Amino acid sequence: MKIIAIANQKGGVGKTTTAINLAAALAQLKKKILVIDLDPQANATSGMGIDGKDMPSLYPALLGQLAAEECILPSGRKRLDIIPSTMDLAGVEIELARSGNHLTRLRETLAPLRESDAYDYCIMDTPPSLGVLMTSALAACDEVLTPLQCEWFGLEGLAKILHVTAQICASGANPRIRHEGVLMTMYDGRTNFSEEVAAEVQKFFGESVYKTRIPRNVRIAEAPSHGEPVIKYDRLSKGSRAYLHLADELIRREE
C-alpha cells in the first residue's frame, strides 16, 4: 500500500476536495483505496456521505487502544473505504505531543495495513496547519501531493510544505519521503491570472507539476453537500473528468 498525504498548511486550496475525488477516481480505475481523514474538521468524512458521530476515528488506534483495521468503515462505494475523523482528533494532538515518539506513532499504527495487500493506495487528508497531525502524516507517508490554488498567496503555502517535508526527511523521521507533485486547483483558463500563476509554478517545479489542472467547477463545489464525490454526483462534469485524468496521471507516474 502506497501512502499519499494530500498536504498544504494553507486552507481553501482544494485539499479535502482533492483527497475525496482523487480517491474516488482511483477506485473507479479499479484500485483499492483507503481514505484516512486526519483533519478534526472531518470534511472528508462528511464529503463522502458519512456521519462521523459515534464512529471510530484514528484516535484510539494512535493511543494503542485499537488496531487501525478496526477503525475502517466501508464508504458504500466499490473499492473505497475510509477511516473517518471526529473532533476527538483535536485532542490527540495534545496526547501525541506529550509522547516521545509522536512523529513515528502514526507510521507505526499504519504499519500492518501498509504490509497487507488490502489496499493499493491510502489517501490521507491532512489538517490545514503545521501541527502534530500534519507532521505525523508527513512522517508516515511515502509521497506528498500539494494542491495549489491558482493565486499568488498559494505559493507561500507551497514553499512552507516543501520546507517541512525536507526537514522531516533530513531528521531521519521519514528518509524515504518525496514530494510527489503539485496540483493546480481552481484553475480558470479564461483568465490571464490563472495562466500566469500556473506558468510561474511550472517554471520553478517543472515535471513535478501535474499536467492535469482542476478547474473551477460548480459541480465540484456542490458535490460535498450531497455527500458524494463529483464523479458520482455528475460523472460528465468537467470536474469529474479532471479528477479521472488526475488519477490516471498519478498511476502512470508510478509505472
Image (cartoon, rainbow, N blue to C red):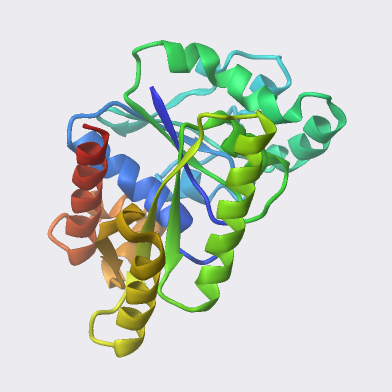
Q: Is residue 81 visible?
A: yes
Q: Quick check: can you spot residue 185?
A: no
Looking at the picture, how far across and down is residue 118, in whole percent? 35, 15
Please give left or right for residue 108 compared with residue 102 in the image. left
Q: Position of residue 148 (x, y in %)?
A: 44, 64
The residue that appears at 47% across and 16% down in the rendered structure is 113
Q: How many marks?
A: 0
In which quadrant is the N terminus drawn?
top left
In this rendering, is residue 2 above or below 149? above
Kindly give the residue lying farthest to the left in the view shown. Answer: 236
Vertical relation: 154 (above or below) 129: below
The quadrant of the image that shows the C terminus is top left
- Point out residue 124 in the picture as x, y percentages from the top left corner: 49, 39
Task: Report the residue that reaches farthest toward the bottom.
Answer: 192
State left or right for residue 130 relative to residue 249: right
Where in the figure is residue 18, as x and y percent of width and height? 38, 53
Q: Is residue 147 left or right of residue 172?
A: left
- Res. 224 image quadrant: bottom left
Q: Residue at x 51, y 29 (%)?
A: 176
Is 204 placed left or right of 156 in the picture? left
Residue situated furthest right in the rendering: 98
Q: Nearer the viewer, residue 221 or 101?
A: 101
Question: Which residue is painted at 82% across and 38% down in the image?
Answer: 94
